[in-house]
Image (spheres, rainbow, N blue to C red):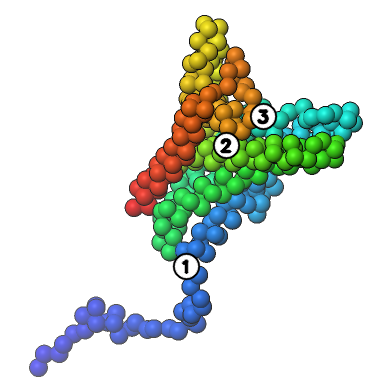
């Protein structure tokens, strides 16, 4: 009588064992998308200043923060010592003067916020959890904008406190301080959106830094050059319209039209109310467009 020989599959089945090594299922609370968004936002905001990272990562953002605040502290000291009747620089003008430092900060931190996730292919891991593409983009956008707002608002706080110590008019200083905060809030949103869009298209941090610096500085240089040419040619009416093509001059046009600032454009021509409204619409449109581009980009990356 034939004897059935065990097949390799049957032999493997006989040798298989299930071992209980002590793993337990998670039975705690499920914190959900809102908690994940808050965590991603807080960690990205901390990372923008190197907190929770190596000492080397803290050097540049902290140095730029000090560079932003030290001139304001010097201005305050001079105003207090000389008993001046006004600050040397208005609140709305300070960020425009320091735009090179702001651009360098955005160029250094926007790639840090998103390029490493692309380089190490960790973006799909985020989307394997409860958060979605829009959650990731909102958290990163809000974190960089908040970090940039801290950078630009801190020297305004120094100026405001110094103005009160110098016993300048409280109402005037409070109004100027509020206008300055509105200006830097718009600047933070616009610069963060542009920086993140550029950085999101390259996993190389060095390329991202160079690209952000090039876009912000070259556009500003080209626009101011064209404005200077228009001023020398007597076409002063075109100066505000040319300012639509650079992030820095866009913010300058908005605050010159609605926030009581004096424009830094060649010729000193402040935009009219209609031109200022166009500047506002362009700023809001660019912020919205940057958000939309980021969502589309990470929808493709997460697939």
Q: Nearer the viewer, residue 147 or 226?
A: 226
Secondary structure of the residue carrying numbered label 3: helix
Secondary structure of the residue carrying numbered label 1: helix
Whole-percent x, y for residue 232 in the image: 55, 7
Secondary structure of the residue carrying numbered label 2: helix
Q: Nearer the viewer, residue 52 or 137?
A: 137
Residue at 83% across / 29% down in the picture?
85
Depth-wise, is mark 1 or mark 2 nearer the camera? 2
Q: Which badge, 1 or 3, comes first in the chain's sequence?
A: 1
In the rendered view, would you say 17 is above or below 87? below
Q: Give the numbered dot on residue 32.
A: 1
Q: What residue would you read off at disc 2?
A: 187
Residue at far top of view: 233
Quarter of the figure that contains the N terminus: bottom left
> For residue 157, what is the image quadrant?
top right
Task: Please tell me how crowded label 1 is: few (under 14), some (14-19), or many (20+) other residues with Cα within 10 Å.
Answer: few
Q: What residue would you read off at disc 3?
A: 93
- Disc 1 and disc 2: Cα gap in Å? 32 Å
Q: Which badge, 3 or 2, comes first in the chain's sequence?
A: 3
Q: Decide if residue 198 is in sight here.
A: no
Q: Which badge, 1 or 2, comes first in the chain's sequence?
A: 1
- Cβ atoms under marks 3 and 2 closer than 8 Å: no
Q: Determine whether, in the image, residue 53 is placed left or right of residue 237.
A: right
Whole-percent x, y for residue 108 in the image: 59, 38
Residue at 50% across / 34% down in the picture?
280
Q: Decide if residue 33 is in sight here.
A: yes
The number of numbered badges drawn on the structure is 3
Q: Nearer the viewer, residue 95 or 140?
A: 95
């Amino acid at each position: 009588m034939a004897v059935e020989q065990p097949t390799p599959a049957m032999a493997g089945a006989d040798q298989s064992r299930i071992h209980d090594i002590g793993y337990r299922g998670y039975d705690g609370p499920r914190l959900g998308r809102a908690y994940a968004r808050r965590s991603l936002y807080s960690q990205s905001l901390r990372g923008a200043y190197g907190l929770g990272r190596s000492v080397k990562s803290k050097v540049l953002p902290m140095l730029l923060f000090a560079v932003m605040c030290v001139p304001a502290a010097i201005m305050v000291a001079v105003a207090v010592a000389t008993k001046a009747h006004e600050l040397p620089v208005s609140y709305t003008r300070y960020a425009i003067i320091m735009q090179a430092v702001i651009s360098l900060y955005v160029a250094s931190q926007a790639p840090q916020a998103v390029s490493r996730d692309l380089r190490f292919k960790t973006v799909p891991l985020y989307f394997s959890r409860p958060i979605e593409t829009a959650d990731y983009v909102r958290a990163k956008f809000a974190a960089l904008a908040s970090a940039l707002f801290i950078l630009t608002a801190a020297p305004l706080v120094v100026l405001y406190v110094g103005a009160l110590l110098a016993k300048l008019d409280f109402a005037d200083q409070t109004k100027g301080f509020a206008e300055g905060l509105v200006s830097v809030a718009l600047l933070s949103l616009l610069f963060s959106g542009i920086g993140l869009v550029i950085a999101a298209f390259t996993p190389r941090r060095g390329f991202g830094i160079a690209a952000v610096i090039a876009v912000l500085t070259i556009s500003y240089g080209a626009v101011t050059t064209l404005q200077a040419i228009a001023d020398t040619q007597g076409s002063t009416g075109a100066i505000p319209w040319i300012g639509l093509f650079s992030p820095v001059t866009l913010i300058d046009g908005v605050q010159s039209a609605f926030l009581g600032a004096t424009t830094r454009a060649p010729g000193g021509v402040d935009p009219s109310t209609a031109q200022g409204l166009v500047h506002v619409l362009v700023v809001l449109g660019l912020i919205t467009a940057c958000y939309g581009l980021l969502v589309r980009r990470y929808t493709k990356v997460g697939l």
